[in-house]
Amino acid sequence: MPTGVAVGDFNHDGKLDLVNTNTGSDTISVLLGTGIGTFQSIGFITLMILHHM
């Protein structure tokens, strides 16, 4: 489930991109802006999160 969103030109192509955190799967989704109001998913980045016991 997405919980946080960041917007910026992360790949420096002049188009806004999205990155969001996903609770439960410990991943980040990366979506690149197309410049026409849509986004293309390039996949997930898995985070290494140490859960306290």
Image (tube, grey):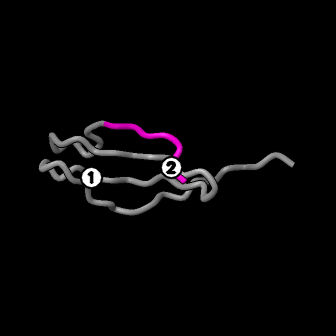
The crowd level at tag 2 (other Cα within 10 Å; few <14, some 14-19, many 20+) is some
Residue 53 in picture, x, y percent from top left: 87, 49
- Give left or right: position of 41 versus 52: left
Residue that appears at 39% across and 63% down: 43
Residue that appears at 32% across and 53% down: 31
Q: Amino acid at mark 1?
A: Leu
- Give left or right: position of 26 versus 28: right
- Tell me whether the residue at label 1 lies in contact with that at label 2, contact meaning CB atoms closer than 8 angstroms: no
Q: Quadrant of residue 15?
A: top left
The part of the chain drawn in magenta is 1-7
The crowd level at tag 1 (other Cα within 10 Å; few <14, some 14-19, many 20+) is many
Residue 50 in picture, x, y percent from top left: 73, 49
Residue 4 in picture, x, y percent from top left: 49, 40
Q: Which residue is mark 2?
A: 2
Residue that appears at 54% across and 58% down: 46
Q: Amino acid at mark 2?
A: Pro
Q: Is residue 21 above or below residue 8?
A: below
For label 1, the SS is strand
Nearer the camera: disc 1 or disc 2: 2
Q: Quadrant of residue 29?
A: bottom left
Q: Which residue is mark 1?
A: 32
Q: Which mark is residue 8?
A: none
Residue 11 in picture, x, y percent from top left: 25, 46
